[in-house]
């Protein structure tokens, strides 16, 4: 049970860290999937 809990916590930490880092680097979905003619509010 301890291994499953550790794996779950590690997965959550990696996912949140990747979301934050990619957003800061400009690799968000809004930045990569929209063209210059799209107005994002």
Image (cartoon, rainbow, N blue to C red):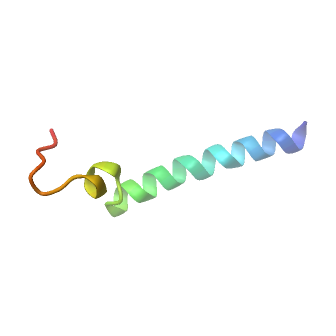
Residue 33, position in %: x, y? Answer: 28, 53
Does residue 18 appear left or right of residue 40 in this picture? Answer: right
* Residue 9 against residue 14 in the figure, above or below: above
Residue 21 position, x and y percent, is 44, 58
The quadrant holding residue 6 is top right
Image coordinates of residue 38 in percent, x first then y, are 13, 48
In the image, taking residue 8 as reference, residue 3 lies left or right, namely right
Residue at figure coordinates x 22%, y 52% from the top left: 34
Q: Is residue 11 left or right of residue 5?
A: left
Q: Residue at x 35, y 63 (%)?
A: 25
Instruction: Quadrant for residue 26, please give it.
Output: bottom left
Q: Position of residue 12 (x, y in %)?
A: 63, 43
Q: Above or below — where is 9 with respect to 36?
A: above
- Residue 10, placed above or below residue 4: below
Q: Is residue 6 shown above or below 28?
A: above
The structure residue drawn at horizontal position 80% and vertical position 39%, both measured from the top left corner, is 5
Q: Residue at x 87, y 45 (%)?
A: 3
Q: Which residue is situated farthest in the bottom direction here?
A: 25
The quarter of the image holding the C terminus is top left
Q: Quadrant of the N terminus?
A: top right
The image shows a total of numbered marks equal to 0
């Amino acid at each position: 049970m301890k291994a499953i809990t550790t794996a779950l916590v590690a997965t959550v930490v990696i996912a949140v860290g990747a979301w934050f880092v990619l957003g800061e680097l400009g690799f968000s979905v809004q930045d990569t999937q929209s063209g210059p003619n799209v107005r994002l509010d």
